[in-house]
């Protein structure tokens, strides 16, 4: 008898990365928002799946390597019509088989597509979290669109630059309080080297960044979001989720490839860092 299936479905983009430092310098590496979020969820001990469109830029070998690392791609679909990486976003139909034991995390996609995906899974999965981070050159969210998404999901995550663009000259704490007053159940602003700040039930939580042991090789925002979604789902403990998300993000950032960090050592590193962060975190205010 197999173990119960539960975890996080990361809905976003799948791409290839140029390797900057690796023992296989000439080999392409899988990347993209959905993979990084799925790796974040895996590192905190959850099962991980990806819902994406697999274009011709993602080779059969890369797909095989992703599945060999334990990430489920059954909700992804292949197409030969993508001329440029990331041009096609996943559709709501791809999430039809997600069970109530799973959480869904929507990576940075267009506001219209995030709205469609949210409507498709709302009320029938454990939790829905949304990250508003976009690829460079993509259309940006308006404040109205962000608030609409925030009030209809279980937690929304955004970045410092986007928060500053939508709420100029306002401190992160006040931005979060405004979102809460408008109906957001939980919200987090990722501050990069400044850590992160979140709100739930009117309580503000600050989380410091974990100091890296080497210069960053990968971005950490999507891994943070995927790990956050995984840890937040069971009991909605904001500080706990932020600590583990921070630990996962720092571990991914130190790796030359998302898949290379998917080891027992990677999970132990995340757990050790998360415990340290939790012990140093001040009570929510």
Image: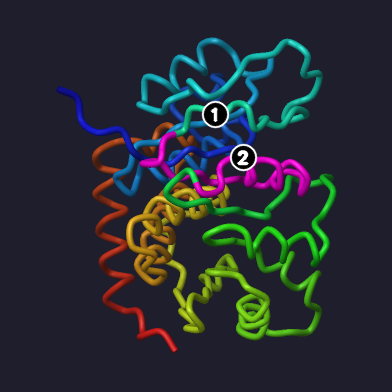
Query: Which percent across, then down, holds residue 119?
Result: 64, 45
- Give the camera-side residue of 115 and 246: 115
Q: Which residue is mark 2?
A: 120
Asked if residue 69 lies left or right of residue 55, the reply is left
Q: Nearer the viewer, residue 59 or 42?
A: 42
Q: Residue at x 61, y 36 (%)?
A: 32
Q: Residue 274's spot in the image, x, y percent?
A: 31, 63
Q: Cβ–Cβ below 8 Å for labels 1 and 2? A: yes
The residue at 45%/53% (across/down) is 229
Rendered position, 218 above or below 28: below
Is residue 102 in the magenta section?
yes
Query: Is 63 displayed left or right of 77 in the figure?
Result: left
Percent x, y of residue 139: 85, 48
For label 2, the SS is helix
Q: Which quadrant does the C terminus fall into?
A: bottom left
- Asked if one can make out residue 185 in the rendered structure from this viewpoint, the answer is yes
Quarter that holds the N terminus: top left
Mark on residue 96? 1
Label 1 secondary element: loop
Q: Is 245 included in the stretch rendered in magenta?
A: no
In this view, the residue farthest toward the bottom is 285
Which residue is painted at 56% across and 23% down in the image?
76
Q: Could you tell me how far apart the alpha carbons at marks 1 and 2 are, in whole angstroms?
A: 8 Å
As displayed, is residue 196 above or below residue 59?
A: below
Q: Earlier in the sequence, mark 1 or mark 2?
A: 1
212 on left or right of 163: left
Q: Residues within 10 Å of mark 1 (few under 14, many from 20)?
A: few
> Looking at the image, which residue sits at the far left?
1
Whether residue 191 is visible: no
Task: Name the quadrant containing residue 140.
Answer: bottom right
Quadrant assignment, res 68: top left
Span colored in magenta = 99-123
């Amino acid at each position: 008898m197999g173990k119960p299936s539960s975890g996080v479905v990361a809905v976003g983009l799948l791409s290839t990365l140029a390797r900057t430092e690796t023992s296989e310098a000439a080999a392409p590496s899988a990347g993209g928002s959905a993979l990084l979020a799925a790796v974040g969820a895996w590192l905190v001990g959850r099962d991980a799946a990806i819902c994406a469109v697999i274009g011709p830029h993602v080779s059969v070998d890369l797909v095989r390597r992703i599945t060999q690392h334990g990430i489920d791609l059954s909700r992804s679909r292949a197409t030969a019509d993508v001329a440029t990486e990331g041009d096609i976003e996943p559709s709501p139909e791809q999430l039809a088989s997600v069970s109530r034991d799973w959480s869904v995390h929507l990576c940075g996609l267009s506001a219209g597509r995030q709205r469609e995906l949210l409507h498709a899974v709302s009320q029938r999965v454990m939790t829905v979290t949304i990250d508003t981070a976009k690829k460079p050159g993509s259309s940006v969210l308006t404040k109205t669109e962000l608030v609409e998404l925030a009030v209809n999901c279980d937690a929304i995550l955004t970045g410092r630059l986007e928060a500053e663009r939508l709420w100029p000259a306002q401190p992160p704490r006040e931005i979060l309080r405004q979102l809460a007053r408008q109906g957001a159940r939980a919200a987090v602003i990722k501050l990069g080297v400044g850590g992160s700040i979140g709100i739930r039930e009117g309580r503000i939580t600050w989380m410091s960044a974990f100091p890296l042991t080497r210069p960053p090789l990968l971005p950490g925002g999507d891994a943070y979001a995927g790990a956050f979604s995984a840890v937040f789902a069971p009991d909605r403990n904001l500080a706990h989720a932020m600590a583990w998300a921070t630990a996962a993000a720092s571990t991914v950032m130190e790796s030359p490839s998302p898949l290379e960090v998917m080891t027992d050592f990677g999970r132990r590193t995340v757990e050790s860092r998360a415990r340290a962060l939790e012990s140093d975190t001040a009570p929510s205010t």
